[in-house]
Image: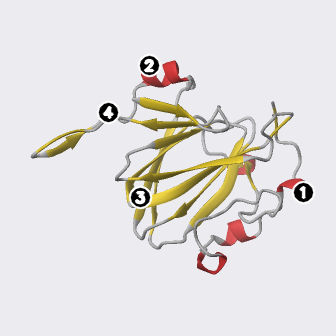
Amino acid sequence: MKVERLAIPDVLLLTPPRYGDARGFFSETFNARRCAEAGIDQPFVQDNHSLSARRGVLRGLHCQVAPNVQGKLVRVVKGAIWDVAVDIRHGSPTYGQHVAAELSAENWSQLWIPGGFLHGFCTLTPDVEVIYKVTGDYDRSAERGVIWNDPDLAIPWPVAPEEVQLSEKDTQLPRLAECDVWFRA
């Protein structure tokens, strides 16, 4: 498995190999030992699968706080997304900064987003299917979020603002500056 540290070194881009022949391909998309060697040493407790029907669907920016902090290992099995992680660990040298990567069924890459980060993605194609493993149970009372277009974060989303499609919940999220301290470095 190819492992790349991004500009925020705790966020990893993982690309597992695919072995193809005339029948199709095989890929080992998760291996606990290899992930631990890369620094992902928390157990995964849940798998999630989402479908976004149109280009421009934006899900995020979300996180979960204690006691059910979630790290996420995100991959795309159909279509393409632009996946974003924002460091919100107070005291971190990269606090408020983001990294992003295009994940697609074609490039087969996965993004590891540890706890202490906001996560969001925007679909680049229609009919996108995303599968992600998480390290904490879903906990509605631990859900937190920040508005996708917070000017202090200045995330350069790859779709025009008028193309963005949000859930009702995501339209009501605050700016990061209005939030409590959720994580410390």
In the structure shown, which secondary structural element does the residue marked by tag 3 occupy?
strand
In the structure shown, which secondary structural element does the residue marked by tag 4 occupy?
loop
The picture places residue 162, in percent across and down from the top left corner, at 64, 81
**Residue at the spot of label 2:** 33
**Residue at the spot of label 3:** 129
State the residue at coordinates (75%, 46%). 97
Name the residue at the bottom extreme: 162
- How far separated are the C-alphas under marks 4 and 1? 42 Å
The picture places residue 15, in percent across and down from the top left corner, at 41, 37
Question: Mark 1 packing: few (<14 Cα in 10 Å), some, or many (20+)?
Answer: few
**Residue at the spot of label 1:** 178
26 sits to left or right of 161: left
Sequence order check: which comes first, mark 4 or mark 1? 4
Q: Which mark is residue 28?
A: 4
State the residue at coordinates (77%, 69%). 172
Name the residue at the front extreme: 7
Sequence order check: which comes first, mark 4 or mark 2? 4
- How far separated are the C-alphas under marks 1 and 2? 40 Å
State the residue at coordinates (20%, 42%). 25
Choose top left, top right, bottom left or bottom right for residue 18: top left
Q: Is residue 29 above or below residue 54?
A: above
Task: Give the amino acid at mark 2.
Answer: Arg
Sequence order check: which comes first, mark 3 or mark 2? 2
- How far separated are the C-alphas under marks 1 and 3? 32 Å
Task: Give the amino acid at mark 3.
Answer: Glu
**Quadrant of the image for the C terminus?**
top right
Question: Mark 3 packing: few (<14 Cα in 10 Å), some, or many (20+)?
Answer: many
Toward the viewer: 175 or 169? Answer: 175
- How far separated are the C-alphas under marks 4 and 3? 18 Å
Task: Give the amino acid at mark 1.
Answer: Glu
The picture places residue 89, in percent across and down from the top left corner, at 80, 38
